[in-house]
Image (cartoon, rainbow, N blue to C red):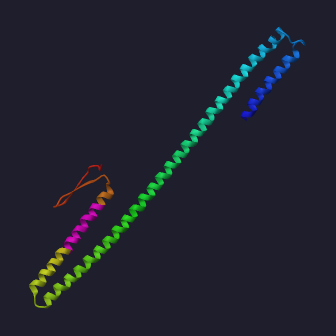
Amino acid sequence: MQLLKFLLGLLLVQGITAVLVLISANDLQGIAILRIALPLLFISLVVAFWFSSIANYHHKDSVEKVKSSFAKEREKIRVNAEKEKTKVVKEAQQAIAKEAKNTHAKANFKVGVSVAIMGGVGVLFVFAQMVTAGLLTLTTLGGAIGGYYWRGKREEQYRQLTHQNPDLKVIESKSSITFLPFKKK
């Protein structure tokens, strides 16, 4: 389409030049050449400005197309990077959760085995006529089980509170955990 606009301008200039030469006097000398050259110069200037205007318009249009294509590509790259980042974070969280689950399972197994052994020793003491030692062992076992139960409740409460309100800041002390509604930095 752009070529047709320039071709039309060139054909127009050539046609006007041919018409001016045909209608001029047969002897082109002196002032007759000036009569043809002045209108041709004016027409050439008008066509040159016309071509310049067309070229500037198409240059701006092509620059805008390139800018918009770069903007689309940049946005596409940003979106893909954000998707990849989210994917990596999810994979890392899943790996951490899986590792934590395995660690908790191993720890729970070890605690279970130690509780069973301690219970067996306490029962053995009671059957072996060492009732005081057996009762002390069984009482200690009950305290340990109660402590693990209480700790599990606190951890569950903490998970529920932080899941409901992720901006919750937790202050831990030796005696208890206090939940304060401060935003994390």
Report which quarter residue 3 is drawn in: top right
Q: Residue furthest left?
A: 132
Report which quarter residue 133 is drawn in: bottom left
Say above or below: 95 vs 142.
above
Task: Inspect the magenta stretch and tell me whether residue 63 lies in it.
Answer: no
Say above or below: 28 vs 158.
above
127 with respect to 61 (left or right)? left
Question: At x 84% / y 17%, what residue is drawn?
Answer: 20
39 with respect to 62 (left or right)? right
- Pick whichever, 6 or 96, lies toward us: 6
Question: At x 28% / y 73%, what residue is drawn?
Answer: 107
Say above or below: 42 vs 73.
above
107 with respect to 40 (left or right)? left
Q: Residue 144, percent across and down?
A: 19, 74
In which quadrant of the rendered image does the N terminus lie? top right
Q: Residue furthest top?
A: 31
Q: Residue 180, percent across and down?
A: 23, 52
Q: Residue furthest front?
A: 29
Task: Inspect the magenta stretch and tell me whether residue 153 lies in it.
Answer: yes
125 with respect to 159 (left or right)? left
Tell me the magenta residue range: 145-159
Q: Main structural element of the magenta stretch: helix, strand or loop? A: helix
- Pick whichever, 181 or 88, lies toward us: 88
Q: Residue 63, percent across and down?
A: 60, 36
Report which quarter residue 24 is drawn in: top right
Question: At x 25% / y 68%, what residue is drawn?
Answer: 152
Q: Residue furthest bottom?
A: 128
Question: At x 40% / y 64%, what residue is drawn?
Answer: 94
- Pick whichever, 177 or 174, lies toward us: 174
